[in-house]
Image (spheres, rainbow, N blue to C red):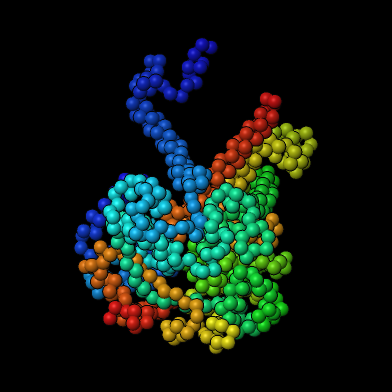
Amino acid sequence: MKTLTTILAAATLAANAFAGNITVKGSDTLVILAQKWAEVYMGQHADTKIQVSGGGSGIGFAALQNQTTDLCDASRKIKSAELQKCITVFGGARPTEYKVALDGLSVYVNPENTLKELTVDQVGDIFTGKIKNWKEVGGPDAPITVYSRENSSGTYEFFKEHVLKGKDFAASAQTMPGTAAIVQAVVKDKSAIGYGGAAYGGGSKLLAIKKTENSPAIEPTEENVINGTYPIWRYLYVYVNPAQDKGEIGAYLTWIRSDDAQKYVKDIGYYPLPKNLRSN
Amino acid sequence: MPNQNHNSRRSHGWMGIHRGHKARPVEWLAEKFIFLVSLSAILMVLLIFLFVAREALPVFFGQTNTALVQKPIPADEVDKHSPAELQVYLEITPDEFGKMSKTTLRTLMEVKVEAQDEIPENFRNDPDAHINTTEWKYLVKPHQWDNYTKPEYIWQPVGQIKKFNIIPLFVGTLKVTLIGLLFAVPLAVGAAIYVSQMARPRVREVVKPAIELLSGVPSVVVGVFALLVMATVLQTIFHYQTRLNAFVAGLALGFAVIPVIFSIAEDALTSVPRAYTQAALALGASRWQTAWQIVLPAALPGVFAAAVLGFGRAIGETMIVLMVCSASVMSWSVFDSARSITTTIAAEMAEAVNGGPHYRILFMLGALLFVATFVSNMVGDFVIHRFKNKLEGKR
């Protein structure tokens, strides 16, 4: 296994020796955006080849450790175990983390549901199974069916840490393979509640979210996500070995955080970085 | 006959030379080549098993630790600890430790301390944060976690406290597989009897390929169909609470399994000697009696083999269950959701930290599944032989 990894690493390094070959691997959440960026960048720089593949943030970090990828897309922060492996391999250097886009998470309900808004705590209690009926939060008298994502998804983890405050999802929560599947289920199920990227909610109703009992209810619009008033949002990241963050790769990393690249973010369903986090 | 044994041997000596025959090097080569190919298939299975087992071993030996709160060693105190202690603390091999520079080691120590600092306040005093959740008692027995009112089987492998109870996954797998088989076996065997015994040739020529065409439908397509159409239709009929549940998944699984069972059962039924049927009909039995009382019993080993293969297909099917239902509920009710082992592995492997406890446990599940299918095939084989011997009057 070890020799195989070495050979693979050597092969990739050899491939990289030819000018302008960048490999990007990691999060499935980011893969479409990464492909879009790669396409545009390759159009502008004919001698650069960028290969983008998905697989998941965990796969991306594993590839970063094995040095089989140059950039690692991630929809979550690097975990301490992964960080340690990277440091061991990079000879004491920590991987550099770049924030590349924002993602606002909406809470979806069936369009026939009369409810309009919830507090973050109420959303958490619904997903942990503490609140079981819509009437407890001012809706119709009907049991709640909870739809969640697979626990491999960065969205799941983010929601669990920040909305459920680290508590477990209700065991009865249906886990769906993707945001689109959640929306499908919510549209077909009158008692349903689900969560996912704000741009995916087509057909379902997006609830306005209150940070606390007394704060105003905020709609998950682009403006509210970018100025930070909408309470449920996260960053999307790219990680790189600092030793490689120069030349072609460095230029690409600077470009994806520039105004030019950030204008494509919205087409894919995420939100561009606020001005102060951009590279120009 | 003295040379009968000799003749029945398949291999014909060096280069095919045998009792005055000409040398046949090409045939000999071909024979050896085919032998190598078949050997490589066995070798492949063995290698896969060894790989899976190797990745899973640390769980079996209790070498993984998921305790959230661990006593951090400040980075300045590196020199006060022996290399062996540091290796365990940093979870690195002696080999890696030897190659490491002082600064790398220091950075690693700092990361470890930072990780402890980042633990949210409300988890620090949680009793669950101090236990290693990958011990066997937490893997197979219910445990009363913080925030729960009674001991429960919980599979929630991602989060601050990682809960790896594998029992809900086994229950889910069995539930979905059994529903699938209960639905598929009668239908497929019924169809096989009809096609092989009763249908007119013209009908058979349409029905048989049509059913076998089902096996060409990708399971993702079956999954989507079940997710969007079947789930809604079945909920309107049965009025249950959870729209996506083991029942829907089981029925969808049935569709994937039917062609497998049908194909083999139909072959078995067709290969019952014509003389049996003719004799029964000549004695005045109806076609129905012949099919039910003569042909089916004679083909029973084959039909059983079909069911065993169907079981293998059902238990290994990933995509349909993944799309239709995958909540790891601990419940035997068919109208509750379920999560199968294959679904769990497929869905979670990508994000698991490579070499971490979650990764190891997924491999352990794979190894257990491997053993389970192996045992079921062995039992199936044994039963088939018993049937066969009985039918042939050997005992």
Specify the farthest residue to the right: B284
- Say which residue appears at 45% left-offset and 43% top-offset: B54
The mark total stands at 0
In the rendered view, tell whether residue A105 sits above or below residue B340: below
Q: Tell me the quarter of the picture where residue A93 sits.
A: bottom left
Place residue B197 in its image quadrant: top right
Is residue A254 rendered to the left or right of residue A177? left
Using the image, determine if residue B375 lies above or below residue B363. Answer: above
Residue sitting nearer the eye, B242 or B42: B242
Task: Report x, y in % for residue B118.
Answer: 45, 67
Residue B183 pos. (x, y %): 67, 53
Name the residue at 75% across, 43% down. B288
Question: Residue at the spot x=28%, y=54% of the render?
Answer: B101
Taking the image as shown, residue B184 lies to the left or right of residue A66, namely right
Residue, far front: B80
Depth check, front residue: B215 or A17: A17
Quarter of the figure with residue A27: bottom left
Residue at (46%, 58%) from the top-left corner?
Answer: B71
Q: In the shown orientation, is residue B389 left or right of residue B46?
A: right
Q: Foreground residue, A1 or B275?
A: A1
